[in-house]
Amino acid sequence: MTLTRRQALVSAGAAAFASGLAKPAIAAKDPIQVGYLPALTGPSSSTGIGINRGIQLAVQELNAAGGIDGRQIELITRDTQSDPTKAVNGAAELTRGQKVSVVFGPVNSGESLAVVPLLARTNTPQVHPCWVDTLTDPKKYPMCFRNAPTNQQIGAAANRYVVNILKKKKVAVISDTTGYGTASVNAYVPMLKGMGADIVYQGNVDAANPDLKPELLRMQSAGTEAIMPWSVNAGFLSRIINTRGQMGWDVPIVGQTTLGSGQTKDLLEKLDYWAKVYPNNFRPVCYQSDGQLTDRTREFLDRLKSAKIDIGDTLLWWIAIGYDSPRMIAEAMKNAGTEPQQIVGYLNKLKGFAGVFGDISFTPEQHDGYPDEQVVMVEANSLKDGAFRLAPGYGA
Amino acid sequence: MVESIVSTGLAIGCIYALIGITYNVMYSASRVFSFTAGTLGMLGGILGALFIARMGMPVAAGFLLALAGGALFGLVTEIVAVRPVLKSLDQHLYVLSTLALALMVQQFTAIEWGTEARPFPRLIDIPRGGFDQQFWLPMLACAVVIVGLELLHRRTLVGRAFLAIAEDTYAARALGLPERRLRMASFALAGVIGALAGFAGGQMLLAFFGNAPLLTFYGFVPVALGGMGNNRGAVVAGLLLGLFQQTANFLVGGIFASVAVFTVFILVLLVRPEGLAGGVTPRRV
């Protein structure tokens, strides 16, 4: 039997039509691939390891509950090894090779600075928890959303605590000489002045400087009522706390979350020196003024314990961010669909997503979803089960 | 204020002086200015914290192992970064090779040890006081090294061989001295001194990978001011640097203290390019 050109074209068309019809039926059973770019190894991996515990639990729970319309969620993980270059490689592979529907991460700002523009070019929806202000911009990166605070919110919360709650007006602002440190001082000092504070000391000091006593003596003689250090360097922060302790000075120290980290604690000469040190944290994952966690967080903590997830060596808010992120993405997919535009369209109108870490809302013009009032200060020496107690002065 | 300037200034000055001596010991044996000196100081602190604080070894064992680690890195420096460039010293390739090795070790340390400063253990179990062990240990280490080097150079045959190599490599080789082995021994000795600087200063500087560039730069100043290869000059210049830096910390503070240190450094070199204690070496024609 010979096959005419017309018959061949008709057959090919029929086959294409048939395969076109069959494809959605098969695809509907396929897992939904979610790209995930954590730093699980390398120097900045402590955050990624904490976040990863929450992510894994959330995906496990979502899949156990039937996934999204019967489709399981499959996390396609690429360890960035705390290296922006590897994060970029991972992002390229997730979008071009794996063709994931959405990407969560990277979880460190340095990596996100490299990855966000790349994902924007490939029109891939992205959710990340990184703080650097420029990492969201609905015009430049319309598919990128942040479900964590910005550096502006972090600084503003510390400033509000010093000026409005502690009622301290004479403030010393000190940082190390890194980009983060100097940028923070430059951003937060005008905010403080705008709130009526008097900046009696302002300085940038090399983080490796072994003796900060001259700086603290200068602050003391200027009449400082609160010290605000901006650095992620535990050595630098512990030297400030130790020197204050050696001087027998009880001025409050208010600033970045690293003030309350285990690394800072390890470097203290005496644990007593950690009193009156108030780092940033987040109200929903703190012990409230009555000493209790909120119902939502207590329930989450119980779930972590029953799933035998270790919280002793990490922080609750890291696990909570990890737990909330896939649930927020899954909610978008369930309600709107798995196509990029559908996910972004849903997130653009997200209002009050009730996460453990916080209530997240976005608008088409605002892709920073974390509410200002949930950024608070806590007592550094109150760490228990990965959570801190609210600093004195916050109401219920 | 004066007490703080003297105790902290002299202690940190002793650490700079020891790093300066580390530079000098390597330089004397090879005419190579090895930029791994600061890395050796960083390793001394981190290895001490690793062996004593993390692995729970006794202080004496941790101390000896940290020095052994320094000696090993000194030998590796000689084999990997110095020996291959000795034939073309005039091209200053050692700047690249030793700096590259220093950066590689620094990055490796950051990855394996972490980028956070970690505590260095209290070495002697006595209560903290005004003139604490964190201040007098570097001074003691510096004194031991000065006396030890003097005894080595004056009283031992090996020490005299070191001096012969430093004075004239070709003549020493012509006399049958094993130049390569002596050079390797010098680098191992430099490794021990550099690691001792980091170990003795560990309680001040902490076990931090970022100490490497700090010590590389500030350890270089005593060498430049004291004259290359001149250990006595390095000690005097190191102590002056520590005192001046600490005074600048009190008087101007912040990053301006570093600016003041390097301004004075440049001015001194403009006036005396051979260093404060260095002499002009006549060139044979």
Image (tube, helix red, strand yellow):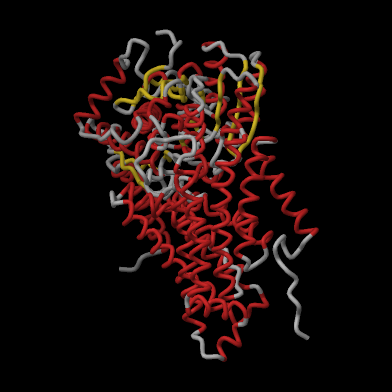
Please, which residue is most extreme toward the top here? A395
User: Is residue B220 left or right of A126 when viewed as pictured?
Assistant: right
Where residue A19 appears, as percent x and y from the top left, is 34, 49
Q: Residue at left 37%, top 51%?
A: A16
The residue nearer to you, when weighing A252 against B7, is B7
Where residue A266 appears, as percent x and y from the top left, is 38, 37
The residue nearer to you, when weighing A309 against B4, is B4
Q: Residue at left 52%, top 25%?
A: A154
Query: Which quarter of the figure has residue A276?
Result: top left
The residue nearer to you, when weighing A357 against A336, is A357
Q: Can residue B6 be seen? A: yes
Name the image quarter holding the C terminus of chain B.
bottom right
The residue nearer to you, when weighing A374 against A216, is A216
User: Is residue B28 left or right of A303 when viewed as pictured?
Assistant: right
Q: Can residue A326 be seen? A: no
Where residue B10 appears, as percent x and y from the top left, is 57, 47
User: Relative to residue B162, is residue A166 depicted above or below?
Assistant: above
Where residue A365 appears, as percent x and y from the top left, is 58, 25
